[in-house]
Image: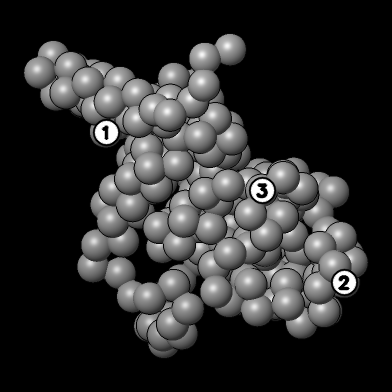
Amino acid sequence: MLDYFQQRRTLLDGSLTASQVAGMLGTSRQTPHDRVESGSLLAVMDRGALRFPTWQFDPEGPHGVVHGLPDAIRALRVSPLAKMSWLTRANPAFDGATPLDALRWGEIAVVVDEASRQAKTLREDTVPMDATVTIASVPVTEETHVMLEELARLDGASIQNVLARAVETYWGRRLNEASNDAYAALKADPKAWQELQNEQAEWEATLADGLDDE
């Protein structure tokens, strides 16, 4: 549980408030909230306010964000924190680079395809991410309950929110594990691996098409 809080703080380190984002992009204070709802910006609720990671912004990108990021955000049908984790973790599907790096290199279609495939794998037979459900009481040890209460006190949150955040972190780890497993299985199949290499070569050729020789 403590590892979860550390990871959350790391992901949100240096993040911006909605007002700061509005000032940076030259929009109204409501616009960042609207863009989170539409999936064109990524933010996590922290202590009652949205926090926006700075790595998603690019002054040269469309609407001030990394090109292709909104497509990846919408493809990842998981919690905001899990999206942040997936986008910023090294991924073997991109030769050890992060999906965010791949977006910056222009590999938008590849990133979105990988995001859609992994999100679908983890989303099967689950309820919508924004749904609230009631389940039977889940017994926990006294030690776990004490830890939950202390973490809730330290973070100024309810125990329910503490548990929700812990699940978000676990979900992000599973997303990365599923991606790693799928990549390893693909690489173990020579035919499938060659097909992937051919697709990537075709995609790179498409990106380069029409560019003037230097």
Residue on which disc 1 sits: 182
> Which amino acid type corresponds to the residue marked 2 in the rendered image?
Ser
Residue on which disc 2 sits: 19
Foreground mark, 3 or 1, reads 3
* Neighbour tally class for label 1: few under 14, some 14-19, many 20 plus, Cα within 10 Å: some
Q: Is residue 190 visible?
A: yes
Q: Position of residue 66 (x, y in %)?
A: 63, 46
> Which amino acid type corresponds to the residue marked 1 in the rendered image?
Ala
Residue on which disc 3 sits: 61
**Residue occupying the point 73% across, 77% down:** 31
* Neighbour tally class for label 2: few under 14, some 14-19, many 20 plus, Cα within 10 Å: some
Q: Position of residue 53 (x, y in %)?
A: 73, 53
| Quarter holding residue 148 | bottom right
Tag 2 and tag 1, C-beta contact below 8 Å:
no
Image height of 138 relative to 13, above or below: below
Q: Is residue 167 visible?
A: no
Counting residues from the start of the chain, the first of labels 2 and 1 encountered is 2
Foreground mark, 3 or 2, reads 3
Q: Nearer the viewer, residue 75 or 185?
A: 75
